[in-house]
């Protein structure tokens, strides 16, 4: 751990369905200290999160702002009595958790909240592979599937916020989605948790030549097809643990181009490989996204 200095430190949380990544970050975006906390029950997880940040304060890393990039769905309506709560989520035990008010009261700081994927999209727009794109989309394919959209530097909210992972598609022949809400949505077909249920083994244990990976590429290409036609993004960033599979990105790009069938004419010199990309910030998109939330006007 570094020695504290007189600097405006920021607390950051990337709150996901599998883990909470917590960090202290300085004004130059240097990560000072971090801790991974498993996502179990709200009580257990948030107690450990609060303990970590209180330890940082005792060590001299004081902060007034906390960026919370959180899995959802979230209530982001500041006029709502339930603002800052996780609402109806597939994550067991977490529905209707007032996560923002719990952390705000315990840590005596101002919390800047958005979805984990909106925050990651913002970080990729500011410092990663979507720099200065007028429309940038970040998709995470991990325990679940989520999508964030940044338009002209601002995260998209609208009625609630994007829930791209629950876009319904026709599944490839021979498989059935397992989302408890929608069945054949992207999350129900392509999330790591869903792949494990569909193929009866963890995704990371599936061999390279297993048909699951070709089907995964087709599902995610259908997602990219729809995103390109609905949002006209200049960049689609595909992150999350599932995207670590070698060759998966290239197959998604090929299936997307095949699916579009020449309908979109790209600007001269661009290919779909220039649009559909892995994160430029590697595993830090979420934490830097939480940091970025505290910098928004």
Image (tube, rainbow, N blue to C red):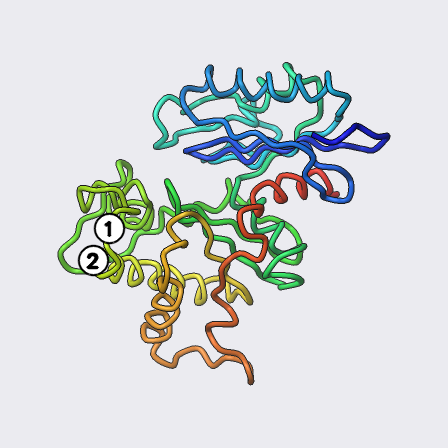
Q: Are marks 1 and 2 in contact (CB under 8 Å)?
A: yes
User: Residue at left 27%, top 49%?
Assistant: 189
> In the shown orientation, is residue 200 left or right of residue 54?
left
Q: Is residue 108 left or right of residue 113?
A: right
Query: Measured from the top left, where is residue 5 in percent x and y?
Result: 83, 30
Residue at 66% x, 58% y is 152
The answer to whether residue 85 is above or below residue 279 is: above
| Alpha carbons under labels 1 and 2: distance apart | 6 Å
Q: Which mark is residue 206?
A: 1
Q: Quadrant of the C terminus?
A: top right
What element does badge 1 sit on?
loop
The tag on residue 210 is 2
Q: Quadrant of residue 13?
A: top right
Note whether 263 is above or below 157 in the view shown: below
Foreground of the two, 227 or 8: 8
Q: Pointer 1: residues within 10 angstroms few (<14), some, or many (20+)? A: some
Given residues 164 and 29, the one toward you in this image is: 29
Q: Which mark is residue 262?
A: none
Q: What secondary structure is found at the residue carrying circle 2?
A: loop
What percent of the width, then of the height, locates residue 51?
59, 16
In the picture shown, does residue 140 fall above or below 132? above
View extreme (right): residue: 6
Q: Residue at x 44, y 61 (%)?
A: 227
Res 111 → quadrant: top right
Q: Percent x, y for residue 182? A: 27, 42
Q: Nearer the viewer, residue 13 or 241?
A: 241
Residue 40 screen position, x and y as percent: 40, 23
Rate crowding at label 2 as few (under 14), some (14 to 19) or many (20 or more) other CA atoms within 10 Å: few
Residue lying furthest left in this view? Answer: 174
Q: Quadrant of the N terminus?
A: top right
């Amino acid at each position: 751990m570094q020695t504290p200095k007189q600097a405006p430190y920021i607390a950051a949380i990337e709150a996901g369905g599998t883990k909470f990544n917590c960090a202290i970050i300085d004004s130059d975006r240097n990560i000072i200290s971090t801790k991974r906390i498993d996502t179990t029950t709200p009580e257990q997880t948030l107690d450990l999160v609060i303990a970590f940040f209180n330890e940082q304060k005792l060590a001299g890393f004081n902060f007034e702002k906390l960026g919370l990039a959180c899995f959802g769905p979230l209530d982001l309506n500041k006029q709502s009595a339930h603002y800052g709560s996780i609402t109806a989520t597939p994550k067991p035990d977490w529905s209707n958790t007032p996560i923002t008010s719990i952390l705000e009261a315990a840590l005596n700081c101002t919390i800047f909240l958005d979805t984990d994927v909106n925050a990651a999209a913002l970080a990729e727009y500011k410092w990663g592979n979507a720099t200065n794109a007028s429309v940038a989309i970040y998709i995470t394919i991990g325990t679940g599937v989520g999508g964030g959209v940044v338009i002209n530097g601002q995260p998209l909210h609208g009625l609630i916020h994007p829930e791209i992972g629950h876009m319904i598609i026709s599944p490839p022949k021979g498989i059935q989605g397992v989302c408890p809400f929608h069945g054949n949505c992207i999350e129900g077909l392509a999330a790591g948790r869903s792949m494990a249920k569909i193929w009866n083994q963890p995704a990371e244990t599936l061999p390279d030549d297993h048909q699951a990976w070709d089907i995964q590429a087709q599902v995610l290409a259908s997602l990219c097809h729809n995103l390109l036609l609905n949002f006209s993004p200049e960049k689609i960033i595909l992150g999350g643990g599932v995207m670590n599979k070698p060759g998966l990105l290239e197959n998604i790009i090929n299936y997307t181009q095949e699916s579009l069938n020449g309908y979109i004419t790209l600007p001269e010199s661009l290919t779909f490989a220039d649009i559909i990309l892995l994160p430029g910030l590697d595993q830090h998109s979420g934490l830097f996204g939480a940091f970025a939330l505290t910098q928004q006007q």
